[in-house]
Amino acid sequence: MENGRNDEITPYRMGQIMKTAAHVTEMIVSGKTLYHPTYHECEMVVELVSDALKKGKEEYRRKQDVSK
């Protein structure tokens, strides 16, 4: 976890995280955006989201380092 942040996730927060994960999963497999996605295509979507989050985190850290 990030420095200075509490590593403990409360039960309420974990419930909210699980709701978000369920919502994202439903968006991927419902067929509204991507008609009948394969498991491989679902994995690609998750990897793309993960990569975008990593890049955003790196950019945030760079901005924090510059401001110090």
Image (cartoon, rainbow, N blue to C red):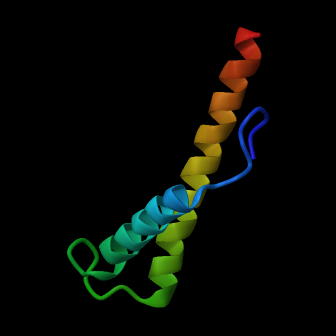
Image: 50 above or below 66:
below
Residue nearest the viewer, comparing 49 with 15: 15
Question: Hey, which residue is sitting farthest top in the picture?
Answer: 68
For residue 32, which quarter of the picture? Answer: bottom left
Image: 33 above or below 11:
below
Location of the C terminus by quadrant is top right
Give the side of residue 11 with respect to residue 29, left or right.
Answer: right
Seen at 64% across and 32% down, the residue is 59
Seen at 73% across and 14% down, the residue is 66
Image: 11 above or below 54:
below
Residue nearest the viewer, comparing 49 with 19: 19
Residue 42 at what x, y percent from top left? 46, 79
Give the side of residue 57 with respect to residue 18, left or right.
Answer: right
Question: Hey, which residue is sitting farthest front in the picture?
Answer: 11
Residue 43 at what x, y percent from top left? 53, 78
Give the side of residue 10 with respect to residue 32, left or right.
Answer: right
Query: How many dots with numbers?
Result: 0
For residue 6, which quarter of the picture? Answer: top right
Residue 47 at what x, y percent from top left? 57, 66
Seen at 40% across and 67% down, the residue is 19
